[in-house]
Image (cartoon, grey):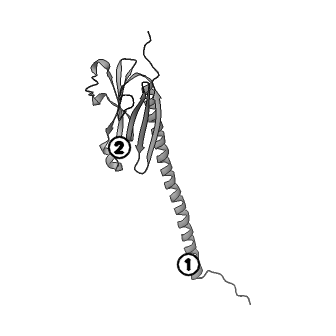
């Protein structure tokens, strides 16, 4: 006589359910960690794109200039004043972003742009109309403009998210030298 088995024992079922549960936990954690890595990579790529866009905007603006007004050669400043070929003074400056600083826990700024006609601008007492300022970039940790010569400025800018900091350094020269006689 042969002894045939037609069902699983309770111990075998408990072992199988335990193994399936363990395997599903491992697979879930694998996918969960890859999703968080993807999110982190997307935040980094987004910030790198933001930094590159900011750099390109600054370069385009400065290349429209004909003469740097402030800072002086050899000096560094958090603001840049330059004249353009249309008879305007353009200013790049930073202003604290209280809301973003609070949400990230870091002191962050907005990079702003202001343009005013030369006749309405006093370099010894530079005032501006905030309603005529435009935002160039946000998430700015710091920015510095260093005049290396009469036609060139070195720019060092730091950007930050809650978890990471990014830094960019570049040099821009004036392309427009104004009218020739």
Residue that mark 2 sits on:
108
Nearest the eye: 15 or 43: 43
Tell me how many marks there are. 2
Residue 9: x and y in percent read 60, 82
The structure residue drawn at horizontal position 29% and vertical position 17%, both measured from the top left corner, is: 119
Residue 33: x and y in percent read 51, 58
Q: Quadrant of residue 90?
A: top left
Q: Answer left or right for 89 relative to 43.
A: left
Residue 17: x and y in percent read 56, 74
Residue 16: x and y in percent read 58, 75
Label 1 SS: helix
Residue that mark 1 sits on:
14
| Quarter occupied by the N terminus | bottom right
The structure residue drawn at horizontal position 51% and vertical position 51%, both measured from the top left corner, is: 38
The structure residue drawn at horizontal position 42% and vertical position 16%, both measured from the top left corner, is: 178
Q: Answer left or right for 18 relative to 137.
A: right
């Amino acid at each position: 006589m042969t002894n045939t088995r037609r069902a699983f024992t309770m111990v075998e079922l408990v072992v199988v359910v335990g193994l399936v549960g363990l395997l599903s936990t491992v697979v879930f954690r694998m996918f969960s960690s890859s999703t968080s890595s993807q999110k982190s990579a997307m935040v980094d790529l987004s910030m790198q794109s933001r930094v590159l866009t900011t750099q390109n905007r600054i370069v385009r603006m400065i290349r429209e200039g004909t003469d740097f007004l402030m800072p002086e050669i050899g000096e560094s400043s958090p603001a840049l004043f330059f004249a353009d070929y249309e008879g305007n003074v353009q200013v790049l400056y930073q202003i604290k972003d209280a809301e973003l600083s609070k949400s990230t826990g870091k002191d962050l700024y907005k990079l702003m742009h202001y343009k005013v006609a030369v006749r309405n601008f006093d370099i010894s007492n530079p005032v501006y109309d905030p309603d005529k300022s435009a935002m160039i970039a946000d998430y700015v940790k710091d920015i510095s403009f260093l005049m290396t010569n009469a036609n060139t400025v070195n720019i060092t800018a730091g950007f930050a998210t809650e978890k990471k900091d990014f830094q960019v350094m570049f040099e821009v020269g004036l392309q427009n030298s104004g009218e020739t006689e």
